[in-house]
């Protein structure tokens, strides 16, 4: 799906670098996506959602490890060793 390519590009080439001492991973990810024009909204059972045209939502969670991911959500995973983020789309 093309939307996931745009989301991945937003976190791989962010407008600001993620600095864990200054902002949470969730806040950083939401900022990066909003900067690319996504409508990021509150989600009750996830960290946040991206609202698509037509009202459909894609739900995301953020984490610092890729262990035991629930694949009903999209995940933004921060690798502190390489200081990069990656996207794991929902299945």
Image: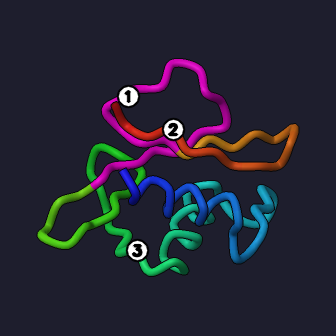
Question: Disc 1 vs disc 3: Cβ atoms closer than 8 Å?
Answer: no
Q: Residues within 10 Å of mark 3 (few under 14, many from 20)?
A: some
Name the foreground residue: 61 vs 52.
52
Crowding around mark 2 (Cα neighbors within 10 Å: few <14, some 14 to 19, many 20+) is some
Q: Name the residue: 87% across, 38% down.
A: 81
Q: Secondary structure at mark 3?
A: loop
Real-space Cα distance between discs 2 and 3? 18 Å
Residue 73, located in which quarter of the rendered image? top left
Query: Where does the image place residue 80, in percent across and percent down from the top left?
Result: 81, 41
Residue 46 located left or right of residue 9: left
Task: List the residue tagged with mark 1.
Answer: 71
Q: Please give left or right for residue 75 compared with residue 18 in the image.
A: left
Dividing the picture into quadrants, the one containing residue 55 is bottom left
Confirm or deny contact between disc 2 and disc 3 (CB under 8 A).
no
* Residue 88: numbered disc: 2
Residue 11 location, quadrant: bottom right
* 19 within the magenta span: no
Label 1, label 3: how far apart the Cα atoms are: 22 Å
Identify the mark nearer the N-term, 2 or 3.
3
**Location of residue 34 in the rendering, given as x and y in whole percent from the top left corner:** 48, 76
Q: Residue furthest right?
A: 81
* Mark toward the start of the polypeptide (1 vs 2): 1
Secondary structure at badge 1 equals loop
Mark carried by residue 81:
none
Looking at the rendered structure, the secondary structure element under dot 2 is: strand
Question: Which disc number belongs to residue 38?
Answer: 3
Are the two marked residues, 1 and 2, in contact with CB atoms closer than 8 angstroms? yes
What x and y, as percent, mark residue 75?
49, 41
Q: Is residue 38 above or below residue 72?
A: below
Residue at image position (86%, 42%) is 82
The residue segment tinted magenta is 58-75
């Amino acid at each position: 799906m093309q939307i996931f390519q745009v989301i991945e590009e937003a976190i791989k080439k962010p407008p600001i670098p993620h600095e864990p001492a200054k902002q949470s991973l969730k806040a950083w990810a939401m900022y990066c996506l909003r900067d690319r024009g996504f409508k990021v909204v509150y989600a009750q059972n996830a960290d946040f959602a991206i609202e698509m045209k037509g009202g459909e939502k894609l739900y995301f969670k953020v984490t610092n490890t890729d262990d035991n991911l629930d694949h009903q959500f999209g995940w933004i995973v921060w690798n502190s060793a390489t200081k990069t983020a990656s996207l794991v789309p929902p299945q």
